Image (tube, coloured by chain):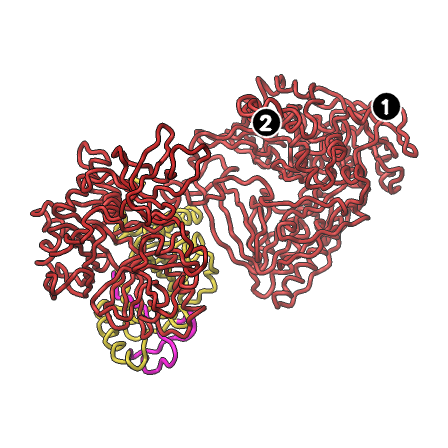
Amino acid sequence: MNAPVPAFSTDASAGTSVVRVTTAAPCARLSLRARGELGPLEAALGLDLPRRIGARAEVGETEVLCLGPDEWMLRGPEAVAPTIRAACDEVYKTHPMSLVDVSGREVTFVIEGTSAAELLTLGCPRDIDRLAVGEGRRTVFDGATVVLWRDATDRFRMDVWHSFAPHVFDLLATGCRELAAEAA
Amino acid sequence: MSQYRVSGRGRVDTGKPVSFTFDGKRYTGAAGDTVASALLAHGVHLMGRSFKYHRPRGPVAAGSEEPNALIGTRRGPGRFEPNTRATVQELREGLEATSQNKYPSLKWDIGAVNDAAYMLFSAGFYYKTFMWPKNFWHKVYEPFIRAAAGLGVAPCEEDPDHYASRYLHCDVLIVGAGPSGLAAARAAAVDGLKVVLVDENAEAGGTLLSEPQATIDGQPAWDWLASELEALKAAGVKIMTRTTAIGYYHQNMIGLCERLTDHLTDVPADTPRERMWRVRAGQVVLAQGALEKPLVFHGNDRPGVMLAGSAQTFLNRYGVLVGKRPVVLTSHDSAWYAAFDLADAGAKVQAIVDLRDHVHVDLLTEAQRRGITAKLGYTASATSGRLRVSSIRVNPVKGGDVGTAERIECDAVLMSGGWTPSLHLFSHTKGTLAWDDDLTTFLPGKTPEDCVIAGASRGPWGIAAALNDGAEKGAAVAAALGKSASGKTFAVEADRTGSGITVKELPTDRSPGKAKAFVDYQNDVTAKDLRLAVREGMRSIEHVKRYTTNGMATDQGKMSNINGLNIASDALGKAQPKVGLTTFRPPYTPTSFGAFAGYHRGEHFEVTRKTQIDSWAEENGAVFEPVGQWRRAWYFPQAGEDMDAAVGRECRAVRETLGMFDASTLGKIEVVGPDAVEFMNRMYTNPWTKLALGRCRYGLLCGDDGYIRDDGVIGRLGQDLFHVTTTTGGAARVMNMMEDYLQTEWPDLNVWLTSTTEQWSTIALNGPNAAKLLAPLVEGIELTDEAFPHMSCLECTVAGMPARLFRVSFTGEIGFEVNVPAPMGRKLWEKLWEAGQQYGITAYGTETMHVLRAEKGYIIVGQDTDGTVTPYDAGMGWAVGKSKPDFVGKRGMARPDLVAEGRKQLVGLLTEDRSKLEEGAQIVFDADQPVPMKMVGHVTSAYHSDAVGQPIALALVEGGQGRMGETVHIPMPDRTIAATITSTVFVDPENTRLKI
């Protein structure tokens, strides 16, 4: 407990020829919960909320991922948070919802390379092959809850709560070396 | 070439010699050898001593089922493994192998005295021998048994290797790459199905590696194998060798242990030694084949006595003759072919001794053609030879009578008692077994999993039968996955089909009571032990197993279970299925702890959650303590301070001027929605409707049983917005409990919960100067009692950062909690630290926090409560909204035993001798009563307290709240301490210190 725990910096990165892990720049993250008639909320937000769990949508630089039957994760540049907040406040009276700023809660790792999907199998019990490009999932990695975004066949983003990030990153870095040795 | 190596046989590469040592002696083997095959090539059969009797032992098998040839392997410091099967460990340059369980040497072993005294060591000997005198057990018997028993020595150095794990998803997993597994893979690999084929051996092929004489579809078996493996790879089948399916878990989750480096001369960097695969398969085909059974007769464990099929494997796969003058002893046709193969490789087979009176004429013809004597209707009654078999004693059996013995000189005995289908993994699925009278064995019945059995593990015998059954089953699982597939039919020549009979221990003309006829080689269990167990009253096979330890060794009874069952059922006079079979449990073969631990060792053992301010604490010398998964600063010792001194100084700083504390680990939940207040009313014991905007309240959470589960301060930041805090350890549990109620009981409520524990860094400021420090940094509110009274909250700006500011106190001093977005936490901490220097600001840890709150009588859930304490027991009836129609725990609190008199209630204690009590110490009312005394409660918290001037304690005491001022007693090992019951509030009961 009192042994120094390896320091984790917000720009941690690791990588080999087959897969790299980098830390994404901070962004706005908003957890949106709503149910019932979503039309007015979508109109106010100026975007369509995907209805299928795991599906994503994008408007400008704002991305939405459906995480549950009444749950979405919105992310975008830090400046968009007040705009989204204002849009939600506008329709709250008639169409109540919960919009909680969680920008400070988590960090995002970008995982890319030919072995990116294989790297995820070190800690994620889900079938990574069945996570389609352009979709996302809330799942676990090495015991920590994470949200995975698959942006390309060999590129993922992984959102991790801050306090779990060093542990998760440590395994990702170990895996980068292991996969490089395997490819050699 | 080594003496027993046969030129032109086997798959080893004698052109690539590999040097290794066994018990310090240097040997040379060939690339592709195992330790066992390399030693056998030098004529070395003696490889170990047995578990109980220290009898000399050599390999009896050629594969993972080997019970005898267990060795230690070593490659430099820390890389030592005991109990490795010599038949599995592949040779590598420089391998150091050692025998086990011997002293002073393998050939001269003192422990072998046990063998002479074998009558003392019969079944259940522990229970009979070591009963009396009672106090001898701990001092004499147990240490002796522990030292004498066991095989290898546990490693004591840290293992420098690393271990890995992965998840794997596939449509079809096939376990076993013998003929049935290969054919199943080919048939199932259609239409994009993801097929994985695993085998525990170094190369795929199974039986085909030991039967090169066969031709499949016109190709010699090994050529067919090579082209088939290429074809499977081309079809996208993932083939994994050196990979053991160790366990079959729920819903087609199979554990695979892959060995990656043990066979390599040099360990490559960043390559794990072993990898655990957790496979989720749509369909599973178990094609694990069958294991040969030994015959049970006196001296069947002497080095040189081994399974006939294994001798065939050593010859055909490794090019090693296990003996030059072998005798074959069998009840099954398969051993005849072993005799023929060895004879064709130059061995002089002394005789084929068959227990049956009749065998197929073709076998007799083939034996005759090779000049081998066949003895039909014979039994074996003994072997002789000290460290290696030198002769076997056989007798004719006619109508149950055992005739005159004759002795046959030999250097090996190749035995076969028939074959047992390997049903270990099938058994893990809770699959039922069906007894087959013809085969005298259990066959797979029904399983709840999506799993089929192919090949010899469900009965069919011979290469053609295995291939065709595999193809059929492969097509069947593909069809089950919605694909159209058809299994082809294979044409096999020189196939060796055959049959046999099953026997119990062999008839003998000598006293069966003195026979050392081994059933379980690894645990040294004999036929006599099993019969004794039945005589002594064991009726169920489960009891027989535990009494004798038959099948309880690391080989999981692979060889002994069916022989043991046959003998027990004979002794009981019942049919085998009535006696039953013991359950096989994972892992299938011994598996290293490293493979199970995977990456979770050292610093990666478990998640250590740290706050954003943790790094400051580390830089400033904090001592940490674990709280759930978090590590928290415990106290901040300065030079020369011990814990008491540091905590004393930190406490004084808070009471006299100013302290700061990292409270970021507190759980936080954002409750939002039009029904937020209704949800809070139902969830917490307190009423919330009248809580004004910008105010906060201490909330108490109970389970439906009425007992306290959690607590925390809750602020109302909007009409429909509550900022809930929970205990550090309870955060996830409380969130789950709330979601559970919301989703299952109250789905009608329009309210949502979001975990914001890690959204905020939380810094607590406490002490007379807290407001003075904070006031200049806060924008948007004046920090006065009028503008921002105690128990207020507000969204504002602190030191230029967006913040949620709470005025609360768990110390009794003026207190604030500043929440800022988590990544800003350390910046704010440093600003406050700097600005607080003028007030002598002091960083404090969890220990000081505990003291300060105890001085005020504030409970710690989980310390002062133990899951059986109601709000009333804790003296917090004021927190229960009695007029609310309902809330979680309301009905529970009304239960008769929860409202009864004399419940244990939380009180304060002050000791008369001013000593600090021990947390957990028991309390009695009368110190003079006889032992055992009636215990009426226990100490829950105890601390030194400078503020009080003597140590304080909180305690749960029967009817304690009605006993103020009374004396109770705390008996300790050295004395009994008297203490006075007091209020729980030790400091400033009027809360005057909270005013700014």
Residue plotted at (57% across, 55% down): B250
Name which of mark 2 and mark 1 comes first in the sequence: 2
Using the image, name the chain to which the residue with label 1 belongs: B
Residue type at the position of mark 2: Ala
Q: Position of residue B314 (x, y in %)?
A: 67, 35
Assess whether residue A37 is covered by the magenta stretch. yes
The quarter of the picture where the N terminus of chain B appears is top right
Disc 2 is attached to a residue of which chain? Answer: B
Question: Quarter of the image holding residue B50?
Answer: top right
Q: Quadrant of residue B32?
A: top right
Q: Is residue A152 visible?
A: no
Q: Looking at the picture, tell me which residue is in the foreground, B721 or B60.
A: B721
Label ID, residue B149: 2
x and y, in percent, of residue B230 in the image: 59, 53
Chain identifier for the yellow-coloured part of the image: A
Counting every numbered tag in the picture gives 2
Q: Is residue B781 left or right of residue B167?
A: left
* Dots 2 and 1 on the same chain: yes
The amino acid marked with disc number 1 is: Glu
x and y percentages locating residue B349 in the rendered image: 79, 30
The residue tagged 1 is: B406
